[in-house]
Amino acid sequence: MLALMLIIIGIFLRFLPHTPNVTPVAAIALFGAALLPTRRLALLVPLALMITSDLFLGLHDIVAFTWGSVILISLIGWSFKKSSKLSLVLGGSLASSALFFVITNFGVWAMGWYPSTLEGLKNCYMMAIPFFRTFLAGTLVYASALFGAYALAARLIRQTKFARVLLTD
């Protein structure tokens, strides 16, 4: 149920008007990996979100780089299985954003959007800095909201009869 909800929410939010790169995809990859019961499901949820929404938004020649980045971000989130302290969520958000920036912009350069030179690669990364900032901001906000809402809900229901069903820890 959680997996399906994350996919639906992620797709919905990618379709709403938003600042470029301010989507919950990386945050959902982190959160889903921390809470979903299997590594396979943790990898499939954000990938399903990306594939489904990209089929409607439009495919491009760097999808292998974007989808691959999202899978790797899930592996970062998998490390949150034992603890999702605020410092880990913030650090994971930063690491995920940096990983996405490095991989996807390498893809932009490798697919010929910039000259195939070291200078072209440098220019590609320089031109992408504004997108990194918005991606990082979106990931920080959405990850904080997801992990924070979960922690609050867990605290509120811990003493109720629903705790055994709803809490994974």
Image (cartoon, helix red, strand yellow):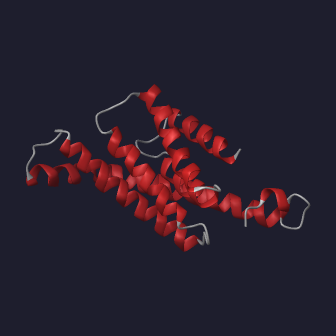
Q: In this view, does 87 lie above or below 58?
A: below
Task: Tell me: 113 left or right of 39.
Answer: left
Task: Tell me: 10 left or right of 118.
Answer: right
Give how far across and how far down residue 88 sits, in percent: 53, 71
| Residue 24 appears in the picture as rendered | no
Task: Tell me: 48 left or right of 109.
Answer: right
Q: In this view, does 17 lie above or below 2?
A: above
Q: How many numbered marks appear?
A: 0
**Which image quadrant is residue 156 in?**
bottom right
Q: Nearer the viewer, residue 136 or 77?
A: 77
Q: Which of 114 and 80 is in front in this view?
A: 80
Q: Which residue is drawn at 37% across and 44% down?
A: 66
Task: Tell me: 37 left or right of 87.
Answer: right
Q: Is residue 112 above or below residue 86?
A: above
Give how far across and how far down residue 146 sits, in percent: 62, 56
| Residue 108 appears in the picture as rendered | yes
Q: Which residue is drawn at 39% across and 27% down?
A: 58
Q: In this view, does 84 lie above or below 129?
A: below
Q: Which residue is drawn at 50% across and 59% down?
A: 140
> Quick one: quadrant of the N terminus?
top right
Give how far across and how far down residue 22 sits, in percent: 46, 46
Give how far across and how far down residue 13 sits, in percent: 55, 39
**Looking at the image, which residue sits at the far right?**
161
Q: Residue at x 53, y 67 (%)?
A: 79
Q: Nearer the viewer, residue 80 or 113?
A: 80
> Quick one: quadrant of the C terminus?
bottom right
Q: Which of 120 and 41 is in front in this view?
A: 41
